[in-house]
Amino acid sequence: MYPLQLPRETVSDNTPPPLLIGYVSVQGAESLLAARPTRLRKTLAAYRAKKATRNSVRHDLEKSGFAVLAESALGFSVAAPGGAYEEITGGTLRAREVLADIDADYTTYVTHWDIVGDAQPKTLGVARPASKALKVDGILIERPRFVHAVFPSPIPPGSPKFHLRVPLDVAVGLSAVPVQQLGHLGEGILVVMPDSGWFRHPFFSANGFNVKPTITVVPATDPSKDPIGHGTGESANIFAAAPAATLQAIRASNNAGKLVGSVAAFLQAKDLDPKPHIITNSWGGDQPFPPAGPPDESEMAFAAEILDAIEQGILVIFSGGNGQFSIEPQVPGVLAAGGVFLDPVGNIRASDYTSGYASPWFENVAVPSVCGLVGMRPRAQYLMLPVQPDCELDREESEADPLVDVTTDGTLSNDGWALFSGSSAAAPQLAGIAALMLAAKPGLTPAQVVEAVTRTAIDVNVGRCHPRFNNAAVPGFDFATGAGLANATAAVQFALDNF
């Protein structure tokens, strides 16, 4: 039975880490933390704060010991010791362990920090400031998010397992080769990828791919490292579709490899100059499904930040999850990435590793919108991707898991290559396809890109998505694969012919 029969929450050690990353919602005409899904898109402008108000709040926060990591028109991503949060809000930090689906069939307890007290609202995790002079709606501790998947040779090694290699195999599977041969390669398109980090693997240099120096948002982290390997590996999927695109990686992990600054990295991404064309995100949270009610203030605040990026003309892509249910891919206007498995003889079926459902929060929204190439359970060891040697994914994928899969990916634990996929891979694949479209037809809006890629997808009518949702792929649009497997050449041609 799914999920595991364990209590949803349990107690935790209440000693906070030395540094907590949070989000401050600055006052606009209306309170963002009172927003609900049905009103969010219609009233987003009312939640944006005046620049003078933001400047005043920034000044007050910095006086109180907060470091501002990133800023948007709605608020700030901040970092501070736990005591600074308690002092400014008048609340108390409390830890709770919440059962979460970290990956397709891996469930564990994850620490959530909340600010509680008599003056705090009923929803945990949000705190009003103790000082009424501070012009903010509330202060939140960032919720945990998870990557959705995980001198080396620039040439991928072999493996006894059936797999696809980057860039060519993935390009073929996404129908990108014909449009690449016509000269559409994604030139001049900036794709930003907040993730675990990025390592300058020889694979990228040998292929001549364009990568900017990595930005970090978590203090005291090394921009040259990727302790998990996830951001490095999944970024290769962008170049499989769009070899001339430009990648800007933003490291959102701490020194232990935990994704503690994902919201901060997203805010940093949309505030870059020049502004990115695409922000692709291979991570998200997890909540009960079906949910007991509407999303809380913490989720709505981040949903508004995502929608704000889309309204600025940035295409936002989120992986739909590997058995997870979270708000990010459900935000209206987001291109939500699911999974389709291409087998050794060219047949396609829904990946049973990835999530698929009708949004219970936003009307006429389904996750996924469309799919990329993803493996099957139990481990989705499907794409041979470059990683930092001896990183977490390099080690874990090369080891047998006696509880899930007794085989390995067939590579060494320190060779800088690993077999993995998940909806984490599908999101940057879609980002590469979008880069082809935006380069071929400058000025496309995010909605036009979503329309082109979904209208031209290859229909999938075999298989089911992850058992947590268990939706079947059927002829036409479905909740297992959305519109189907993305077709790069057809999507570019549709954009050229129709916009």
Image (cartoon, rainbow, N blue to C red):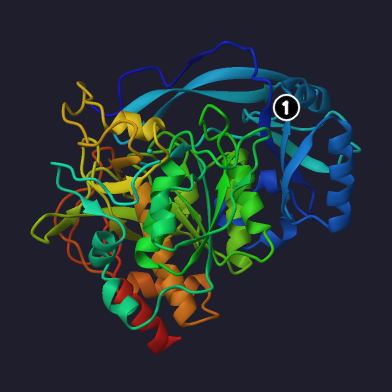
Residue 399 % position (x, y): 25, 27
- Residue for point 78% across, 36% down: 67
Q: Left or right: where does residue 191 sit relative to residue 154?
A: right
Which residue corresponds to mark 1? 120
Observer-nearest residue: 319 or 10? 319
- Viewer-side residue, 201 vs 77: 201
Q: Nearer the viewer, residue 453 or 436?
A: 436
Where does residue 372 sit, x and y in percent of width and height?
Answer: 31, 58
Q: Amino acid at mark 1?
A: Gln
Q: Is residue 141 visible?
A: yes
Can residue 366 be seen at all in this image of the molecule?
Answer: no
Residue most toward the bottom?
497
The percent position of residue 58, horizontal first and vertical second, equals 84, 44
Closer to us: 153 or 66: 153
Q: Residue at x 48, y 77 (%)?
A: 439
Residue 457 drawn above or below residue 411: below
Residue at figure coordinates x 42%, y 22% from the top left: 8
The residue sitting at 79% across, 33% down in the picture is 66
